[in-house]
Amino acid sequence: MHNTVESLQNILLATKAIMSIRLFVVGLMLLAGCGRNVEVNEVTEVTASEDSLPKNVPAISVTENDWPWWRGTSQTGVVTDQEIPTEWGPETNVVWKTEIPGHGHASPTIVGDHIFLATADEKAETQSVLAYDRETGKSLWMKQLHSGGLTGKEGMHQKSSHASSTIASDGERVFAIFLNNDQLHATALDFKGEIVWQETIGAFSPKFGYAPSPILYESLVIFAADNWGGGYLSAHNRLTGELVWRIKRPATSTYSTPVIVERDHQDLIVISGCEKVAAFNPLTGEEIWTTNGTAEATVGTTIWEGNKIIASGGYPGKNTICINAETGAEIWHVKDHVYVPSLAVKDGYVYTVDDDGIAFCWSVEDGKEQWKKRIGGNFSSSPVIVDDKVMITNEEGTTVVFEANPAAFKLISKNTLGEEAFASPVVIGNHIYLRHADRGGNRQETLYCIGQVEEL
């Protein structure tokens, strides 16, 4: 009997050991992005010179009354001279609202009379571009670009979507990018929804989906593709989609949209992630400088003021860094960080809210913290600065408005629409455009236009 009991105990101990090993392996798989087997893709670099750039490509024709790409005309989420309300709700200051089919985290793109959105229908497995009338919110057209091939749960974060990239427009065309069948596909459409060109940018091995938005520079549309199968930056002719240059990036899964930093003698394309901040010549892809900083994974877009570039991230490191735009030398860094939301800067001060709902204000000059305030909620959208107000929406659908004031945090209002929001606010033409969702039995997204509405 004693031997039998001892045998059972040994079996139980062995079973527990096996279960512990299995749980450990599962944990490693989850940390590695759900354990997906990733084949490393060899990225072929394509070089370019300024003499070989596309010819006869019309200039980008957008105005200050447009919001033509991620973070607006300024690329920084900062706008001025906008007469907007600071309070709104389901029955207050809603100029119009319209239901959006599908699911997406892309922010609205606004050019002329049009509003463009990317969306995906997970049940039908489609990815599409939508167009709406700016004045009325009326649907103008819907163009399906892909059917089937959506990334499975093993390659998606629970907060991600299959339409997270904000559309860019040069005033005549709109440029969308979707991850489908482990490839990135870029499409240019005209304002009537007809496809001008469509190109497969390259392979992409997703850990948590795809997030970066296209950016435009002179004759080019540029796409970021940092992924753990082999990262790259890719630039294409805006008119034809033809590849102009492509450079390798580290085989790391990170998610930031690059930005064009404007300088007097040479503009830069700057991107964070892969444990560094890197600057390139936007016309040729030639590396100008690289600085260690931020983290392996970042989501927010780099900002700049004057000669100072500021980037924050991420995971697993926690670091915000300020860099000299000319030399790439570090000016200062702090251990406070923001992972998913971007930063915004105005008059020498940085404002943002981190993922866990803590608002910050730092000095651009030396990184010194001016104030810190917990405002509640979880945040994945990026802030917009409108004159002297900072506006940012949390994941629960509440847009917090506070003063862009380095002296102290001063709350102006909290305004809730729906129950969920991941897209960032767009503020232009004295109106606020918001993409929110009601969960309910059948999740429904809505596009809102907010403005000053006179009460009857």
Image (cartoon, rainbow, N blue to C red):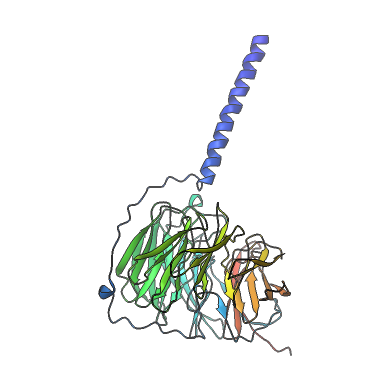
Expressed as whole percent of the image width and height from the top left, the position of residue 7 reads 62, 15
In this rendering, is residue 172 above or below 253?
below
| Residue in front for this viewpoint, 152 or 309 | 309
The answer to whether residue 92 is left or right of residue 163 is: right
| Residue in front for this viewpoint, 342 or 105 | 342
| Residue in front for this viewpoint, 352 or 100 | 352
Q: Quadrant of residue 190?
A: bottom left
The answer to whether residue 25 is left or right of residue 13 is: left
Expressed as whole percent of the image width and height from the top left, the position of residue 28 reads 53, 41
The answer to whether residue 183 is left or right of residue 401 is: left
The answer to whether residue 57 is left or right of residue 98 is: left
Residue at screen point 58% across, 84% down:
80
On the question of residue 448 being in view, the answer is: no
Expressed as whole percent of the image width and height from the top left, the position of residue 320 reads 56, 61
**Quadrant of the snapshot with the N terminus:** top right
**Quadrant of the snapshot with the C terminus:** bottom right
Q: Quadrant of residue 400?
A: bottom right
On the question of residue 29 being in view, the answer is: yes
In this rendering, is residue 53 above or below 353?
below
Total of numbered circles in the picture? 0
| Residue in front for this viewpoint, 286 or 342 | 286
In this rendering, is residue 4 above or below 271?
above
Expressed as whole percent of the image width and height from the top left, the position of residue 76 reads 53, 74
In this rendering, is residue 189 above or below 366?
below
Q: Quadrant of residue 418?
A: bottom right
